[in-house]
Image: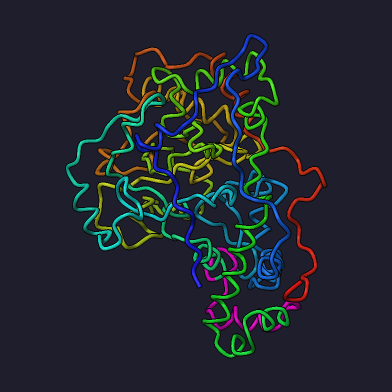
Amino acid sequence: MQIRLVVAAMLCMAAMSQSRAAPEPGPDGSNLNPVQLHRPPVAPLSAVAQIGRAIFHDRSLSASGRQSCASCHSPDHAYGPPDDADVALGGAALNIPGVRAVPSLMYLEREPAFSIGPDAGEVEDTSLAQKVSLAKGAARATKIADTAAASANLVPQGGLFWDGRADTLQKQALVPLLNPLEMANRSEAEVAAKLRAAPYTAQLVQIFGPTVLKQPGLLLAEAMFAVARYQFEDASFHPYSSKFDAWLEGHAKLSAAELRGWRLFNDPARANCAGCHVDQVTDSRPPLFTDHQFEALGAPRNPAILANRDPHYVDLGICGPIRTDLRAQTQYCGMFLTPTLRNSARRSVFFHNGVFHTLREVMDFYNFRDVAPDRAVPHRRGETLAVLSDLPARDRANLDRQDPPFDRHPGQAPAMSTQDEDDIIAFLHTLSDAAPADGSTGEAGSVAPAGH
């Protein structure tokens, strides 16, 4: 069984025409054009999803016996990293650092499958290679916050992980179990043996039949299907309960700083955050604050990552080294998936390599990368950081130098003042989800018998 992620609207003009009127702030910070947002339905977890919840929190499935999915994707931290470590530790002894920052698992229910171009999922008989060929040489529209023109860009979009290499939650769930830097099982058979010994095995058999225990591949497929159902069904993965959601619906007021930040967020000549982190309501669905596309931004090389001690090791995102099917497509080297900004204020690790630890550092990078590079990187004792230091010279043509605020040059004024950055950060805090009314955080619970 495969769970296909619900294909997201790719911000085409037709979808934009179906959007409701843009929010209009009132003098008291209210929204004068409220909308009714359509959220995913909330219901008790199915029996399959209950098993998935148990698997998600099961440390015994790791080689160390001390790491579960929830260890890195903490329910108390927006299903992202529970601390400010640049990368998580994994391996058989839980002492091997990874190579990328832990992404959040929230708001993936509308992530489209990986594709090249705006027609993800529409042309089933077009191979990825054909789409890459069509994209070569295509003119790229500038992405700005007040237009959908960039939706026509034939660029990589969709998928899971920083490089988009998994198309379904089911496939994504399996990867950490077999990654030697994460849960570090040596084979699918080893994972299957642990599943057969788990306390929820009887429920697996009730739902999928006794044959499931005899075929390791089938057992893993059904177990990962259960994890995917848990992520899809449990409202804690997509509550849309932020202050900004409440403001869109007319139930909250934004402060003066938050309103200034929202306006800057959508200002195509200045911050232009919404050019990639789209905040428009389409078809009454809450905005995801991502366009699902990939960008090469030139984040500095992170010396805290052990693999980076090898000068020949370079993480180039879509074109390797972890993803292998697009290694030859060098026009995508250095590109990583644009994440949602929902709950970004609750994180302490930013960008694919965890090199930034505060929203201020992130804002400084965007503001100063092209006008004053030395001010664009954090200055930490014992570390030498520089923009573009993790992107080989041969791949720097892929760098985004077109979309504001990256359309400036050394010596020009930055797009934002310090006050502007403060205001945008204030706005980003409105994207943090409210705590569940019942105090729950998606923690593991008992598994009900199948059919209950």
How many labels were placed on the picture? Answer: 0
Residue 126 visible in the snapshot: yes
Does 180 lie within the magenta span?
yes
Q: Is 326 on the left-hand or right-hand side of 299?
A: left
Q: Nearer the viewer, residue 351 or 28?
A: 28
- Relative to 171, 295 lies left or right: left
- Residue 426 shown left or right of residue 317 in the figure: right
Work out which residue is located at the far left of the displayed protein and give it. 137
Compared to residue 178, the image places residue 295 above or below, namely above
Residue 422 x %, y %: 59, 19
> Looking at the image, which is closer to me, 151 or 172?
151
In this rendered view, identify the residue nearer to me: 426 or 349.
Answer: 426
Q: Quadrant of the C terminus?
A: bottom right
The image quadrant of residue 420 is: top right
Question: Is residue 67 visible in the rendered structure shown here?
Answer: no
Q: Which residue lies furthest to the top in this view?
A: 27
- Residue 80 percent coordinates (x, y): 62, 49
**Residue 30 quadrant:** top right
Q: Would residue 310 be counted in the magenta stretch?
A: no
Q: What stretch is highlighted in magenta?
A: 178-200
Q: Residue at x 47, y 33 (%)?
A: 278
